[in-house]
Amino acid sequence: MVAVAILAAGKGTRMKSDLPKVLHQMGGRSLVEWVLNSLSELHLSRRLVIIGYRGNLVKEALTTLSNDDPALPELEFVEQPEQLGTGHAIQQLLPHLQGFQGDLLILNGDVPLLRPETLKLLLKTHREHQVPATILTAHMPNPKGYGRVFCNGQNILQQIVEDRDCSPAQKQNRRINAGVYCFRWPDLAKVLPKLTSDNEQREYYLTDAVNFLDPVMIMDVEDYQEILGINDRKQLAAAYDILQTRIKDQWMTAGVTLIDPDSTTIDDTVQLEPDVVIEPQTHLRGKTLIRSGSRIGPGSLIENSQIGKQVTVLYSVITNSTIADGSQIGPYAHFRGPVAVGSHCRIGSFVEIKNSTLGDKTNVAHLSYIGDATIGNQVNVGGGTITANYDGFKKHRTIIGDRTKTGVNNSLVAPITIGEDVIIGAGSTITEDVPDDCLALGRARQVIKPERGVKSRLKKSSDA
Ligand code: UD1
Ligand code: CA
């Protein structure tokens, strides 16, 4: 049996933030969510999260998440009322894990790049060696700030010393403590009460508990980047960069073209099909899916949207929307979802669409605002057509039937229903419903006044 405990009570002083450190976002997920995700290969019997600083925020953020997957054991939140160190945090588990005979995996909540396979291997190593504890270690090019791990040639731990408590000679050691541990819980439970705060930070260190146990195995992680801990914003940015490299490498291997990977960001939650082309300065976020043959960018932001096959999106912002196959979007379109665009549509430059549905082969090619509308198939929305959807108090719907053509500079004052096969004259303000197959005009009749042009005016003023 394996239980996991995640340390998430600290404030994260070095972040200089009101938000608890573990809730800082990295590529679409919070740090602690990344840590939870790294457990995906393990069969866990319990999941405990130690909360403290603004614990309710952490609890709320994680509760909404964990509801997503009913297969996992429910998250149990354990309060550490005062943050007196990582050892003190684990001491809070004593009443909760009374009688638990299994292994306890402990992870810092600020180590977001761990690979699931690494944790699986750690657990396997721990079990094979039947030791009271196995800890994950790495060789860090720059070990500053990390606890240093000293061991003998057989990978048996001799001592962990925190960076601040290291002598200059000890600081030379580049093998560091990742903050990821596997303990036989009954053994750990026995030594936890022995911890003291006799160190530079006056804290109860979990690493001291490790020092009390014997023998403790170490396991080096191959890629040190996995165990980078996030303590400040610089480290957050560096970790994000590593994450982006991983994600982009994965998509390129899977057949996606990234024209300029360095100027592109892709959340881990995005799905791409082979033969998608991502142009420079493009950012793909949230639960976005882009199907094969589509070309996105340059200069686009797509968030929580489904883009069909052979779609092009140029210099546009698209959120919470669905776009069917073969449509062309932009340049400079803005979709504020929910928006559903049918297949082979052309949504052109300087067009904003909000909370609307468009059928197939419908064009909104130039300079329009379409809000709260249902538009049929093969409709041509004339340049500058605006749905007047808001009367200052409430939003109203506009309905436009199949094959209808609105004119340039039409104002469609909602609520309004325009039938199928309708033509609307240029410059019309339409305030009443239009039946099928009609021509609708809503504008003042043109007046011609002879001899009132420029020449005539000049002549009149010189005569006077
Ligand atoms: C810790 C380790 C260090 C290791 C490093 C790896 C100790 C004493 N040191 O140092 O050996 O190299 O992680 O990243 O453990 N937390 C609590 N309650 C507390 C204090 C901290 O829940 O009272 C949580 C924090 O929210 C954080 C985690 O524990 O998620 C680690 O705390 P942090 O202060 O960042 O430890 P480090 O100094 O980085
Ligand atoms: Ca840390």
Image (cartoon, rainbow, N blue to C red):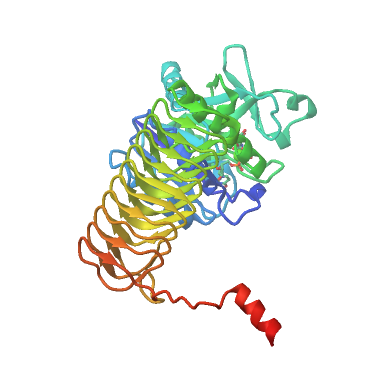
Q: Write the residue at 40% across / 56% down.
A: 353
Specify whether residue 287 is in view.
no
Residue reaching furthest to the right = 168
Quick check: 292 left or right of 205? left
Q: Write the residue at 33% across / 56% down.
A: 356
Q: Write the residue at 57% across / 39% down.
A: 281
Q: In the image, residue 74 lies at what x, y percent? A: 33, 44
Q: Write the residue at 54% across / 23% down.
A: 214
Q: Nearer the viewer, residue 112 or 285?
A: 285
Residue reaching furthest to the front = 463
Quick check: 387 left or right of 229? left
Q: Nearer the viewer, residue 260 or 81?
A: 260
Q: Quadrant of the N terminus?
A: top left
Q: Above or below — where is 282 with respect to 273?
A: below
Q: Above or below — where is 290 with respect to 129?
A: below
Residue reaching furthest to the left = 436
